[in-house]
Amino acid sequence: MNKAQFVEAIALDANISKVEARRAVDAMIRITVQALREGERLTLTGLGTFSIQQRSERVGRNPRTGAAVKIPPRKVIKFHPTAEVE
């Protein structure tokens, strides 16, 4: 399912227009990104938890040459689903 299909499904389920559903989805994405940038966790009951994790520097391999490549530290988004998704 892509974003357009998601918006359409929300519009049908909530009995609202696609424009209103798109605004709601865009707002949800914007608020989620902002919360994660500020280091907060976002827990959506029945879905799961989004959080930021710091990955340390590590050594990887170039798949073509096999040469060692230094991968710098970075922050990544982690998602842990709720134990029971119906």
Image (cartoon, rainbow, N blue to C red):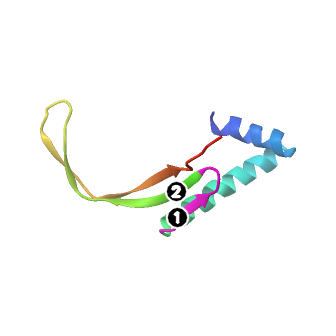
Residue 69, by quadrant, is: top left
> Viewer-proximal residue, 63 or 78?
78
Q: Is residue 58 left or right of residue 40?
A: left
Question: Which quadrant does the N terminus fall into?
Answer: top right
- Looking at this view, name the residue that lies furthest to the right: 15
**Residue where numbered disc 1 is placed:** 41
Residue that appears at 56% across and 64% down: 34
Going by the numbered disc 1, the residue's amino acid type is: Arg
**Residue where numbered disc 2 is placed:** 50
Q: Are marks 1 and 2 in contact (CB under 8 Å)?
A: yes
Q: Position of residue 47 (x, y in %)?
A: 61, 50
Q: Is residue 85 left or right of residue 57?
A: right
The question of residue 42 being in magenta is answered with: yes
Residue that appears at 55% across and 48% down: 83
Circle 1 sits in a helix, a strand or a loop, which is it? loop
Sequence-wise, the earlier of marks 1 and 2 is: 1
Residue 45, by quadrant, is: bottom right
Q: Which residues are magenta?
A: 39-47
Local crowd at mark 1 within 10 Å, few (<14), some, or many (≥20)? some
Q: Is residue 49 left or right of residue 69?
A: right
Residue 15, by quadrant, is: top right
Going by the numbered disc 2, the residue's amino acid type is: Phe
Q: Position of residue 39 (x, y in %)?
A: 47, 68
Local crowd at mark 2 within 10 Å, few (<14), some, or many (≥20)? many
